[in-house]
Amino acid sequence: MSDSSVSVAIAYHSGYGHTARMAEAARDGAASVAGTAVEMISVDALTEEHWATLDAAHAIIFGSPTYMGSASPAFHTFAHDTSGRWYAQAWKNKVAAGFTSSGAMSGDKLHTLQYFTILAAQHGMHWVNLDLLPGANEGELNRLGGWLGAMAQSPGDDGPQAMQKTDLLTAAHLGQRVAEHTLLLHRARSLG
């Protein structure tokens, strides 16, 4: 990686594959920005190498399904396990963003995104929101009208293949936005 490039890590948990598809979309969006390297990391199978990747990343995008009104238990375990990094402020000034999915139309996804923003704030990170107006029609980006991050909805008994294309494109847009903001911040810091 050159001095003018950045790395984005996507730290996510996916119970049934829906959130993994969002993570892939966010990865593709971030990777579409020249000078950006992206790595997906499933938080329920972390290794020391994964932790090193997260520590070295310029940006971390958090992703989790919304279960019982918040992020999944596996994601909460990951957040708890970052406490040593919080104490050392190891992730301070990294860029952060988030995405979530649920089976219900509301499903309390907003609460999951708020949880991610508080986690990022506690780490001293810079939050990147979703800069899209709510989609007025079914085929438009941000059809669920989120502001803090990307949201997706698909019936709980439908597999990940049934996800709305626009929800995945919204996650890709978020990934691209994170990469662009991370590059801007990285370049500004290099001017010193």
Image: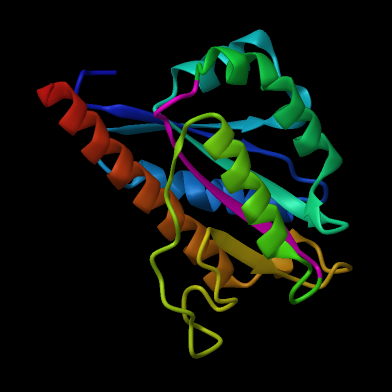
Q: Please, which colouring scheme is shown?
A: rainbow
- Figure check: 118 above or below 162: above
Looking at the picture, how far across and down is residue 165, in whole percent? 56, 70
Looking at the picture, how far across and down is residue 126, in whole percent? 42, 40
- Figure check: 152 above or below 30: below
Q: Residue at x 37, y 51 (%)?
A: 176
The majority secondary structure of the magenta stretch comes to: strand
**Does the magenta run of residues contain 100?**
yes
Nearer-the-camera pick, 1 or 100? 100
Residue at far top of view: 48
Q: How many numbered marks, from 0 up?
A: 0
Looking at the picture, how far across and down is residue 154, in whole percent? 75, 71
Looking at the picture, how far across and down is residue 74, in whole percent? 82, 35
| Quadrant holding the C terminus | top left
Question: Where on the picture, by quarter, is residue 162?
Answer: bottom right
Question: Where on the picture, by quarter, is residue 109?
Answer: bottom right
| Quadrant holding the N terminus | top left
Q: Residue at x 25, y 27 (%)?
A: 5
Q: Say if residue 77 shows up in the picture.
A: yes
Residue at far bottom of view: 137
**Does the magenta run of residues contain 18?**
no
Image side of residue 144 versus residue 4, left or right? right
Q: Residue at x 74, y 74 (%)?
A: 106
Q: Say if residue 29 shows up in the picture.
A: no
User: Start and end of the magenta stretch?
Assistant: 91-103
Image side of residue 118 versus residue 27, left or right? right
